[in-house]
Image (cartoon, rainbow, N blue to C red):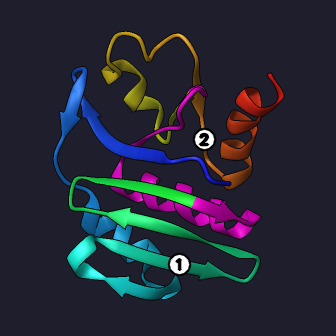
Amino acid sequence: MSYDVFAVGIHEGGSRPGGGAAARAVLQPFIERDEPKFHFLFIRTRDGGADVYLSEDSMMFNHFEGDRTCDLLVAAARAADWVIFPPGCPTCITNESQREHLPPGFTEHVRYVRTGQDLMNALAIDILG
C-alpha cells in the first residue's frame, strides 16, 4: 500500500520522545537497505517489504505489502510503545494503556492492533468505506 502511515509515542495528549531503538531492534533482521543520512530503511520479509523512515521518536512507513511485513511493522510499533496513525482510518493503539493518552479528536475511532491483519482491517475501513 502506498499510504504514509505514522507511528509515534503519545503521553497525555501529546507526543513523547523515544522508542526508536526498540523499533529498530525488531526491524533489524529484516533490513535490506539502510540509509542513515535519510533515516531510511528498506525492510524485506518473505512475502513483501516496506519503505520505513525511522527516527528515535517516530516511524513512517509506506509502499508496504505482505502479511509478514504488516506483522513486523505492528511489532516494531508495539516494542516502541507507539500509536499508529493511518490517515483517514481509525487510530491504532498497540497497547490498551495508550487509549487514555490519545489527544482530543483521535479518541472516537480507535482500534487495538496486535497483528498485521488487525492493521489491515483498520486500513480497510478507509478503502472499503
Q: Quick check: 58 above or below 36?
A: above
Q: Which residue is mark 1?
A: 43
Query: Can you identify the residue that label 2 sits on?
Result: 113
Please say whether residue 121 is one of the residues in the magenta stretch: no
Which of the 4 image quadrants contains residue 104? top left
Q: Position of residue 54 (x, y in %)?
A: 33, 64
Q: Is residue 75 magenta?
A: yes
Q: Residues within 10 Å of mark 2 (few under 14, many from 20)?
A: many
Please state the horizontal and vertical placement of residue 81, each as a whole percent of the image: 36, 48
Quadrant of the image containing the N terminus = bottom right
Viewer-proximal residue, 58 or 12? 58
Q: Nearer the viewer, mark 1 or mark 2?
A: 1
Tell me how far mark 1 sits from mark 2, CA to CA. Answer: 21 Å
Which span is picked out in magenta? 63-90
Above or below 122: residue 108: above
Please, which residue is most extreme toward the left here? Answer: 17
Determine which quarter of the picture holds residue 109.
Answer: top right
